[in-house]
Amino acid sequence: MATSRRDKADSYTQRAHREGYPARSVYKLEEIDQTHHLIRPGDTVLDVGAAPGSWTLYVHRELIKGRGKIVACDLNPLRLDPVPPTVVEITGDAFSRQIRERLVEEGPYQCIISDAAPMTTGNRTVDTSRSEYLAEQVVLLAQEQLAPHGNLVIKIFQGGGQEAVLKTMRGMFRKAKAFKPKACRDDSFEIYLIGLDRV
């Protein structure tokens, strides 16, 4: 049976393992923040779809530097041992009324980040539609809970409704754009939508 490139640990996967991150996705956030300067020490950050925890851990280690708070929300628990002291872990559906109330209690947020993706089916039409729905829900969270001048990062699958989501974001932020980090796999159709400086 042939082995695909995805079956082999690439340089990002190997680096993540060496540096103690659960997944290679950390380097997408690293590039996004280095390019756009999303998060500062002392910020309160909401990570939607946080598990296994690479983005949460990176924010803790490199960005807030122990002087802020990360609210990490996912249907699944984080795979971080130990969970950093700056992290408030919430296990549940970020879009449900009960969890939303908890998120409001922990906010407002200077930045909301989301690497959330739907369970994929292999049907691109279905997968992009589900990804668009997730992105729209994160935008609604940002409308409710993102502080003035706050920033937003959302993953979405290309071919869905990224232009419609981006149009909504352009009404919320002084600058909104699509960005594809170098750490994305060559065959991936994911892209990130970035909103800077909420009006």
Image (tube, helix red, strand yellow):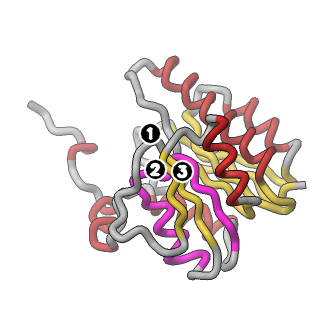
Q: Residue furthest right?
A: 199
Seen in the picture, residue 44 relative to 156 is either above or below; the reply is below
Tell me if 93 is positioned left or right of 107 in this view: left
Disc 3 marks a residue whose amino acid type is Cys
| Residue 180 image offset from top left, x and y in percent | 57, 49
Local secondary structure at mark 1:
loop
Tell me if 92 is positioned left or right of 179 in this view: left
Q: Which mark is residue 184?
A: 2
Q: Which residues are magenta?
A: 43-64
Earlier in the chain: of badge 2 and badge 3, it is 3
Q: Residue at x 67, y 41 (%)?
A: 138
Query: Which residue does the numbered mark 3 point to in the structure image?
Result: 73
Q: Nearer the viewer, residue 31 or 98?
A: 98
Which part of the image, by quadrant, shows the C terminus? bottom right
Asked whether the beta carbons under mark 2 and mark 1 sit within 8 Å of each other, the answer is yes
| Residue 56 image offset from top left, x and y in percent | 50, 63
